[in-house]
Every structure is written in C-alpha cells, then in structure tokens.
Image (spheres, rainbow, N blue to C red):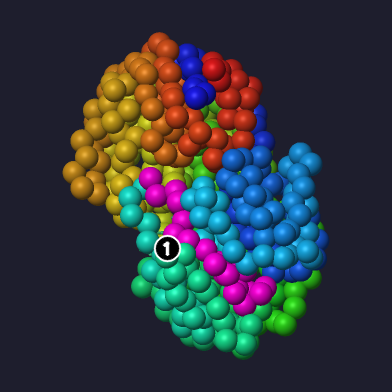
Amino acid sequence: MQKFIVEGGRKLRGEITLQGSKNSSLPIMAAAILCGEECTLRNCPALTDVYAASRILNCVGCRCMFSGNTAVIDSTSLSGTEIPEELMHEMRSSIIFMGAMLGRTGECTVSVPGGCELGPRPIDMHLAAMKKMGVDIRDSGGQIVCRTRKGRAKGTKLSLSFPSVGATENIILCAVTAEGETVINNAAREPEICDLCGFLRACGADIKGDGGSRIVINGREQLHGCDYAIMPDRIAGATYLSMTAAAGGEIILTEACVPEMEPFLNVLEQTGCSIYSRGSRIYLRSGSRLRAVSDRIRTMPHPGFPTDAQAVLMAALAAADGTSVFEENIFDCRYRHTEALVKMGADIQVLGKVAIVRGVQRLHGANVEATDLRGGAAMICAALAAEGTSEITRIEHINRGYEKIEDAVTALGGSIRRA
Ligand code: UD1
C-alpha cells in the first residue's frame, strides 16, 4: 500500500499545465464505442480510472492504445456486449458504457457500478430513461440485462427529476444513434457534458442545446471516427489553486478552462487571494492569511459551486481568519474528509448537510487516510499548509483523478513523496 509523505509549511511557487479532464475522458472513451472506427483522443490523463475504462473497452473487443496523453481507440472489432461485474465495480462511471453499448449494438449486460464512497449513488434515473427509450431491462441474478426491440433505441421526450451528470451522459450516448428525436429536459449543464457532445459532433452526431437545460438529439444511423482534444480538468485546477491558497505563494495554471472554473474562482477570490486570468492562464497569489468566506458555500449543479471542489476549498479555509459555512447539496456523504482535517487541528462541525469551519491559527501534520478522491486531495492541501509532517495512506483514491500529483507539487516547491 503506497502513501504520501508531506512536509508542510513551504510556500508554493511556479507554473503548471493542467491535465485533461477525468470526468470528460471517461464518457468520451465510452462514446468511442459508438463510432465503429478509430478515434484519437488527445489530452487524455494517465489515471487509474482511465485505465479502468480502457479495460472495459478491451473486454468488449475494442482496442485501446496509449502513447503519453494520447489514446487511440478502435471500436471496429467490438465483439461483446457484456461487462463483467468486477470491471463494473472498479468505478461508478462504468455505468455510462450502458448507453454507449446500447447505442452501438442495441443490447448490453451490466451490473450496478462501484465507486460509492460518497453515500448511496443509485442509477434509477439512468434505468428509467433507458426504459422510456424503448429498452427492455431485466434483472437476472444481479446482472442488468438490457435489450432494444429492433436493435435500436427510440427517441423520446425525457424530463429528469434532478440534472444528473451521469444520467444525462447515458441518455445522450444512447440517443445519438437512436431512431428519431430525443429531448432531455432538466439536463445537467456541466462543461464535461459539452465536451462529450463536442466529441460526438466530431463523430457526426446531431446534438443541440448542450450547456443548457434542454438538449435535443436527432439520432443518426451511423457515426464515424475523429481526432479530439479533451478539455482541461477544472477540478484538478481547483485543487492546485486551493493548495497554493492554503500553503501561500504564487501559481500560474496554464491550459486551464477559465469560464468553466468561474463558479469556483468567484468563491476562492473572497478568501483574499489575488486571481487574474488571461486566455487559458490563471494566476493566483495568496497572502499570508486567508479570510473566511462570508456567504454560505452551497454546492449545486453547474453553474453552481462544484461539489468536487468542496473538500479542497474546505482544507484551505480550515486555517483562515473567521468562520466559513459549507452546504453540500449533491451527495449525502461528502464530508468524510473532515475527520482527517480535524486530526490535523481543524475546527469543523458537521450538522447534516452543513459543515461549519472555524478557522484555526495553524494546522499540524498528522497520519491520515484518504477517504475518497477529492477528500484525499483535500488532505494533501491541508498537509502542505500544516506545520510538520503528514502521512496520507489509501492514496489509490487520489490516483483515480490526479495525474502525477507529486510531480506537480514538487515542481511548485512543495515537499511530497510517494513511499
Ligand atoms: C458526476 C461526476 C462527479 C461529480 C458529480 C456531480 C463523473 C465521472 N463524475 O458523478 O465527479 O461529483 O457528477 O457533479 O463525471 N442520482 C440519483 N439517481 C440517479 C443518478 C444520480 O439519485 O440515477 C443522485 C446521486 O446519488 C447524487 C446526485 O444525483 O446524489 C448527483 O449525481 P450525478 O450528477 O449523477 O453524479 P455522477 O454522474 O455520479
């Protein structure tokens, strides 16, 4: 079991290039199944979740080759429609292969996905939407067996009860080759949805309205291959900015997606950090002490404050002047990192969906365990700001979403090593 050893108290200074987005790469890799040809994906981050997606592609007969940050996926030779349970359990995003497989072959067998460390993450909306699109879904000994009637799903009008990112993606994947028109009302508006649609359009799909709440898709009989660059990772960006805010110093993020990061940047700016952006570069300078954020920080679907950035910002605010209040509205169980932050000297009180963070003078190093991907990243932020040494175990959670995080932190002058 690997761990990170972090020596805190050093200011961070330097420039880093943002990795490609994990949350875009996974649905786009699934979408490559639909084109039935070769696709080249650039800016694809080297992450364990990306490799898990590549294992799923391999097991249904697609070829997936990596060279640096370029992935070449050839789905010409697709031969299977069943994704084994152990691969489904590797990550929650495995469920989006359902829409892609249905779109290509009209059938698939999957199981309930893994990655449920944020509390119950049901797939009821995914299944209800597929059923409405004419997919027959049966539970067979824990497996979900899905079949369309004539090998093709049917376009229809759908209204989501909540703008679920995964359900929106699954519907889009199923709809781009379905018969007729599909309308998704109350669709998720996350930038990664636009990235998926950008990829699908490059493959010949007819999709309109992504980025808004109403997406209209006209099914095409066939798609084709393409060459596509994945968008930058706005959550990795939020993490490196939070680290610098917490530890003090100056950072330039290059190849960042500035408009997409605004909901986060607008809140971070309230801590007293100077933040400027030009083109795809973001510059942040952190003073000696951060200020608490006076307005309640409410996580909301995009363009609200992103739930994935809640933990890293909380780590930065743990040693700010004053009290900040978070309200987590997306996941039931997304404060698991607070216990570790408290062990590092933070004063945090969790009351249901609310977390009250009373800024302390200084955090101190401690031995902690990463609870989940973003919670683990928050522990690195806190450890870099803390006095003394911290050991963070269970870093396999962190490897799921950050490409060479220790190299990036070291390049900024932080002290972190993998042991
Ligand atoms: C995606 C992101 C994740 C991010 C989340 C919210 C990926 C790979 N993951 O996750 O990083 O935190 O969006 O921005 O892109 N829900 C249901 N039934 C469903 C589907 C969802 O009740 O059928 C609930 C979930 O339990 C959760 C909420 O809806 O409480 C949001 O989930 P969703 O938007 O679907 O998140 P994911 O797609 O899993």
Tell me where residue 198 sits by quadrant: bottom right
Label total for image: 1
Q: Which residues are magenta?
A: 98-117
**Where in the figure is residue 302, as x and y percent of width and height?**
45, 59
**Residue 206 location, quadrant:** bottom right
Identify the residue at image location x=59%, y=40%: 48
Please tell me in which quadrant of the rendered image residue 218 appears: bottom right
Q: Secondary structure at mark 1?
A: loop
Magenta segment: does it hold 142? no
Residue density around tag 1, few if under 14, some if 14–19, many if 20 or more, within 10 Å = few
- Which percent across, then down, holds residue 76? 79, 65
Q: Is residue 412 above or below residue 370?
A: above
Residue 201 at x, y percent in the picture: 71, 70
The quadrant of the picture occupied by the C terminus is top right
Judging depth in this view, the residue of 252 and 377 nearest the camera is 377
Q: Is residue 311 above or below residue 392?
A: below
In the rendered view, does 384 fall on the left or right side of 411?
Answer: left
Q: Which residue is mark 1?
A: 142
Ligand 1 shows up in the quarter that is: bottom left
List x then y, in percent, for residue 175. Answer: 59, 77
Q: Is residue 343 above or below residue 355?
A: above
Q: Write the residue at 49% across / 30% down.
A: 395
Q: Residue at coordinates 74% horizontally, 69% vertically from top-left?
A: 35
* The residue positioned farthest toward the front in the image shown: 141
